[in-house]
Amino acid sequence: MKRVVGIGGVFFKANNPEKLREWYRDHLGFNLEKWGGAVFRSNGDNGLIDNEKTAWSLFPGDSDYFAPSLQPFMINYRVDDLHALLAQLRLEGCAVDTKIDESEFGKFGWVMDPEGNRVELWEPPKT
């Protein structure tokens, strides 16, 4: 069974998300989307290759989206079959969140690593 097949995104908290977004845009050339983050595609342009993309986004410093982790970041990993992987992780004794989000953006689930970092698992929508 395949497990992680790529990085779906890097997310972290910021005390002033708008100012930090501008810094990344102005100084590192991030092309910010309307939703506030950036998408990096494997071929370096705006065309998708097999739905492969990596997102970059900032969250407000007081966001609880990464809870129960106390870390100011969270990594999102792409997976092929979210439900199967979460079931396997539960069998392996991992701390898997019971919540699963399914939307037009795909399926999302979460697990805590041994050091208390919240890890987001993402199954992209089928194209």
Image (tube, helix red, strand yellow):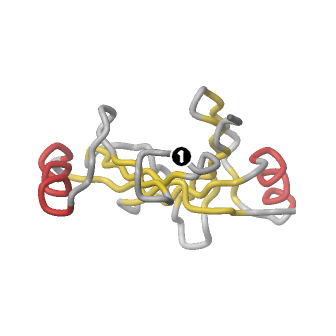
Along the line of sight, which residue is nearer the eye, 120 or 98? Answer: 120
Along the line of sight, which residue is nearer the eye, 17 or 55? Answer: 55
Image location (x, y in percent) of residue 113: 61, 67
**How many numbered discs?**
1
Indicate the quadrant containing the C terminus: top left, top right, bottom left or bottom right: top right
Circle 1 residues within 10 Å: few <14, some 14–19, many ≥20: few
Image location (x, y in percent) of residue 95: 69, 58
Question: Residue 78 vs residue 15: left or right?
Answer: right
Q: Secondary structure at mark 1?
A: loop
Along the line of sight, which residue is nearer the eye, 34 or 45? Answer: 45
Q: Tell which residue pokes out farthest to the top in this image.
A: 104
What type is the residue that disc 1 sits on?
A: Leu
Residue at the (79%, 54%) spot, across then down: 85
Relative to 49, residue 2 above or below? below
Residue at the (14%, 49%) spot, across then down: 22
Residue at image mark 1: 48
Image location (x, y in percent) of residue 102: 65, 30
Residue at the (35%, 60%) spot, across then down: 72
Indicate the quadrant containing the N terminus: top left, top right, bottom left or bottom right: bottom right
Residue at the (80%, 44%) spot, across then down: 83
Question: Residue 80 vs residue 47: left or right?
Answer: right
